[in-house]
Image: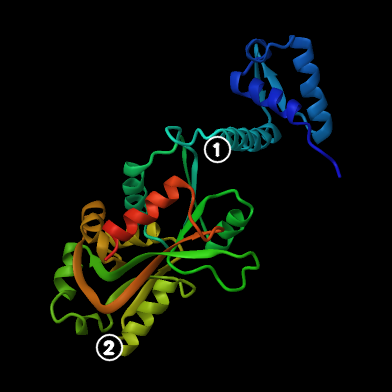
Amino acid sequence: MEWLNYHHLLYFWSVAKHGTVTKASEELRLAQPTLSGQIHLLENTFGEKLFIRTGRRLVLTEMGQLVFKYADDIFATGQELLNTVKGKTDGHSTRLVVGIADAVPKPLATQLLKSALKMYRPTRLICQEDKLRELLSDLTAHRSDLVIADTPAPPGIKEHMYNHPLGESGVTLFATAKLAGQYRRDFPRSLLNAPLLLPTSTAMLRRLIDQWMVNHGVHPNVVGEFDDSATLKAFGQDGHGIFPGATVIEKEICRQYRVQVVGQLDGLLQHFYAITVERRLKHPAVLALVRTARRELLS
């Protein structure tokens, strides 16, 4: 098995941060030729150049940027480990890496995170948005601390995961003032042939709405389907149709997208989860997020 020399990686990381061998050598207390030689050995290990010289400064190559990203995460995690082992987590914040499934409303995710950070502030908050399965892959590889989703982890995922319910919310339909005024009257029967913007058929919210429409005998005209909830709302803001959103952030959606409420889908509930690889939550920021969500945000 081939091993990475972490001393070489540290020297590279320091030079990349400072942009010059001179400043890095002062920080590391190493002679400049020694430092340059160690970085050349790292480049030989990767078989790629990591720097190019521009004037007096060293600039990262494309491969150098990739290696720097990994090095940054490695040394941040190492510092976190030292703080934890030495009992320094009290009074010393840690990193919080959160995956947000693309189906989760962005205003809701933002509200959850802001409320959690009032209780516990990490040194660095990293938010990543993607498809749920991709986010869960990062979670199992311990590249993130939790994933916020509108559905539990699929049973087909091999690695054991734990779904921590955050709560539930009703679903509201929104539209521009013109459309809202037209379709608010005689709701929900007014939705017959109404222009709707919905998530794609793979989304949990779409399946819930489709079933609700069937149960109420309503057959709208679906004029747009979107993977990304923010794009969906942007089209709704431009007046292309009526779109759904979480009732708990009704006021925020109206304010942010300058739209009005058409009506609420009675009896329809959207559930939200924090997915982790640990049954008992330990990360203080994750604990803060789950507790505040359950207490304040979701009805």
Disc 2 is placed on an element classified as: loop
Q: Which residue is mark 2?
A: 216
Q: Amino acid at mark 1?
A: Thr
Position of residue 108 relative to residue 115, above or below, is below
Q: Position of residue 128 (x, y in %)?
A: 50, 49
Q: Nearer the viewer, mark 1 or mark 2?
A: 1
Instruction: For mark 1, give the secondary structure.
Output: helix
Residue at 49% in and 73% down = 202
Residue 84 has which mark?
Answer: 1
Give left or right: position of 128 versus 16. Answer: left
Choose between 123 and 279: the one closer to the eye: 279
Q: Residue furthest right?
A: 1
Q: Is residue 101 visible?
A: no
Q: Position of 78 compared to 126: left or right?
A: right
Residue 54 location in percent, x, y? Answer: 66, 17
- Comparing 186 with 92, the one in front is 92
**Residue for point 26% across, 59% down:** 249
Residue 96 image offset from top left, x and y in percent: 48, 44
Which of these two is toward me, 253 or 281?
281
Query: Which quarter of the rendered picture does the N terminus lie within?
Result: top right
Whether residue 273 is situated above or below residue 52 in the rendered picture: below
Relative side of 113 to 40, left or right? left
Q: Are marks 1 and 2 in contact (CB under 8 Å)?
A: no
The quarter of the picture where residue 172 lies is bottom left
